[in-house]
Image (cartoon, grey):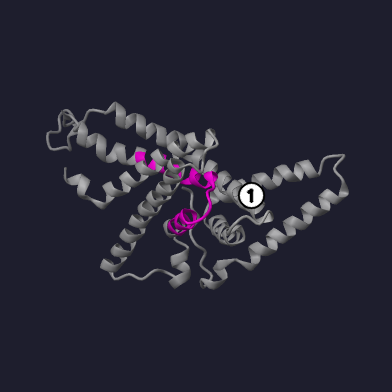
Amino acid sequence: MAQAKTLQFAWFVGHLTLILSVVRYFFSWIRMSTYGRMAQFSYRLGFIAAAATYGIVVFKMFRSRQKAGARMPNGPIGLLADENLQYLVLALVWLFSPQYFVAMVPYAIYSVFHIATYTRSNLVPTIQPPTVVGPPAGNANAKPQYAPNPVADALGAFVKQHHETSMYAVSAMEMLIWLRIFFAAIFFQRRSWFILALYSAFLRTRYAQSVHVQNTFSQLEARIDSLVGSQGTPPAARQVWDGLKRGIRQFHDATDVTRHMAGSAPPKKTS
């Protein structure tokens, strides 16, 4: 069918390949055989698929801007602020880095919703064309009405019901990934310090753009404040936590990219 020849279908296949790769690697992870030949193939294939899907989105964005003769706002900084480009670069980093299973999870969560949305909007109408039930009574010139499709309706309900929760899950996983890399860097695992620096920059950008990431950080801070502020907590622990918070805020202020973007902040992402 003509739909299979489009970039959008290739994008869908990429997300489907990513999900299947994550599932296959998950079984290897459970059996603690993540460095077997099939496990390594699944891991690398997953990030190849992730790079392909986000590469398609970035390519289409550049092509549409080129056709319209529009430039990227704020130049190179505006380009780096694009969320799809960030995930593309990060997928390539994971592809050529030591294996971190947790790094696959955010991509997998996004892919589940992309697959559900594409299936609802494109595949279901192709496989089961909508049935016309006729125009509204007494108005023959009105647009025809279609019978509801239970599969499309179920997919739409799934996306609507779980989208917000999944975005917070992604935010929490991205913070967990940073901790995983941090502990790897402490033990001087291969390339861990380079990955930590790069991922810290990514997470800082995510914080500037995503309301979900900001709320997740705020919730974590409140929980730790509650634990540290409880009776019986050694004063040294409170001092360490206060010093860590000051350091994080100083890092936030020092890396505020809006200072270099003529005072215009990047749009906050709610999805």
Q: Position of residue 196 (x, y in %)?
A: 60, 58
Q: Nearer the viewer, residue 134 or 100?
A: 100
Q: Is residue 127 left or right of residue 241?
A: left
Taking the view exactly as shown, the residue that stands out farthest to the front is 37
> Is 93 included in the stretch rendered in magenta?
yes
Q: Nearer the viewer, residue 216 or 22?
A: 22
The secondary structure type at the circle numbered 1 is helix
- Magenta segment's dominant SS is helix
Q: Position of residue 178 (x, y in %)?
A: 60, 51
> Is 81 included in the stretch rendered in magenta?
no
The quadrant in which residue 85 appears is bottom left
Kind of residue at disc 1: Leu
Question: Magenta segment range?
Answer: 87-115
Query: Can I make out residue 23 in this image?
Result: yes
**Residue shown at 20% from the left, 37% from the top:** 126
Q: Is residue 7 left or right of residue 172?
A: left
Q: Position of residue 111 (x, y in %)?
A: 40, 43
Q: Position of residue 228 (x, y in %)?
A: 79, 44
Query: Can I make out residue 109 in this image?
Result: no
